Amino acid sequence: MNPAQWLLRTATRDPEAPALFTGTQCVATYKVFATTAATLAARLTEAGVRAGDRVALFSGNRTEYLEALYGIWWCGAVAVPINGKLHPKEAAWIISDSGARHVFTDSARATDLTTLLEVDVTCISFGSRDYAQMTTGQALPLPVLRDSDDTAWLFYTSGTTGQPKGVMMTTGNIASMALSYFVDVENVRSDDAILYAAPMSHGAGIYNFMHVMRGARHVVPESQGFDAGEILDLAPRIGPCSMFAAPTMVRRLVDHARQNGLKGDGLRTIVYAGGPMYEADILEAVDVMGPRFIQIYGQGECPMGITALPRETVADRTHPRWRARLNSVGLAQSEVVVDIFDETGKPVPAGTVGEIVVRGRTVMKGYWQNPDATAKTLKDGWLWTGDMGHMDHDGYVTMHDRSKDMIISGGSNIYPREVEEVLLSHPDVREVSVVGAPDPEWGEIVAAFIVLDEAASMREADLDALCIQSIARFKRPKLYRFTDALPKNNYGKVLKTELRQRLSSDEPS
């Protein structure tokens, strides 16, 4: 089993089908796509790359990224995708930790990266003479055979503390994830397109498999990234298209659409994941852009494969429990079993908060060269996600927070997301993040960092009154910090660790 076999099959079946696009311009058919990948594989093999060796990619979004990715798999190697937004020092650490001896990059990153790499690491820059030479000459006829338990993708987590861990994703994990998408999310047709606006190394790029299988189009915006105006202009010209978007990206798309009287024409599907989508935001998103939204819950250790909330449920306003379902992350996907455990590893009753656990063919093999971390996360066949949540009697899973983010105040558990949902219901509140602040009497108190809409003015008393109307008094914030922006990592996730540091050091916001 090898993902490159899917590319070969599609190229054999429909060689002239358009495959790779920059904006509206087709730059490669599936025949050309496959031939380029096979030729890269031959050059990597000649350079000494063997099955199981790691080859890294550190680049912005571009069509060559997919060529190199499938070239790596074609020769049986393991792809190590690195977010192009990381600092070169962070990228160099990942390359070293993975043991990669070849890295594909681009001109914007090549110079800084090269000075940080070990001397025996070869850096190949997209668009360079070296890359052009690697895409010419005799191709490797067939992809190297791999077993379902062989690692294909070494995905480094985006932890906010400490060094990231390398998640070993096997060919079997990838196949399970892709096939679950067809069953639990939506079908993909040959006339569809996938739009890569988020990093191809992570959330966006992982959707390539289903579209390669079906011979659909792969579109990289000319900006090579996320620009709400560009996407809403491009989508009608390339549609029907789908895209992955973190909640912060959805917010920006909806704002631009509303301000310009747009509905998102051409966008068939927007899959949102990677962080909490608050009720007020998804309600507005559906009101402005219609039933285009699907939620997926997954993590690097079980990529895109834990639960799914289909568009019909996201858009439904008639079911007696529609609001609770909208605030959930959906039902377990077909390839996994999902449960809620207490700290002793026992299932808890429906409606009880515990840690979300999952087992099945989509769950990772383990962490790269880190048996201790693997043993802490994989226990008796279950992946402990670190996410707290509950499951209702119908099987819908509702997330509360990461276990480390739960606030214990005066012996009572407080889940920040519950408080955040209430604060976001105020029309003047743009963004909010709630963390625990040390307190000598209560252990911790609830602290809320608030980003207001432009020109909005508000008193703490207004937010206090809102909380008192909606949640128990002990849950309301005892400390408010108004700030211009929330600190976020390269994936758009709020850095709560940094917010806690601000509080502990009493830094001004």
Image (tube, grey):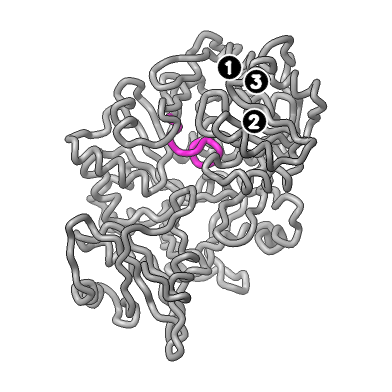
Along the viewing direction, whichever of 253 and 239 lies nearer the viewer: 253
The numbered dot on residue 104 is: 2
Which residue is drawn at the image coordinates 75% and 24% (left, top)?
44
The reply to whether residue 388 is in sight is: no
Q: Which residues are magenta?
A: 195-204
Give the amino acid type for the residue marked by disc 1 in the picture. Answer: Phe
Q: Position of residue 463 (x, y in %)?
A: 23, 72
Q: CA distance from mark 1 to mark 2?
A: 17 Å
Circle 1/circle 3 CB separation < 8 Å: no
Q: Is residue 89 left or right of residue 187?
A: right
Q: Residue 214 in the image: state x and y as whole percent.
A: 51, 23
Q: Could you tell me if the residues under marks 2 and 3 are in contact, i.e. CB atoms within 8 Å?
A: yes
Q: Is residue 376 above or below residue 143?
A: below
- Residue at 68%, 39% in the rendered image: 115
Q: Is residue 111 magenta?
A: no
Residue 131: mark = 3
Most common secondary structure along the magenta stretch: loop
Q: Is the Cβ of the residue at disc 1 closer than 8 Å to that at disc 2?
A: no
Q: Is residue 201 found inside the magenta-colored segment of the image?
A: yes
Q: Is residue 87 above or below residue 224?
A: below
Q: Tell me where residue 444 sits by quadrant.
A: bottom left
Mark positioned earlier in the residue sequence (2 or 3): 2
Which dot, 1 or 2, sits closer to the camera? 2
Which sits earlier in the primary sequence, circle 1 or circle 3?
Answer: 1
Q: Could you say which quadrant of the image residue 286 lies in?
A: top left
| Mark 1 neighbour class, 10 Å CA radius: few under 14, some 14 to 19, many 20 or more | many
> Residue 295: image x %, image y %?
40, 46
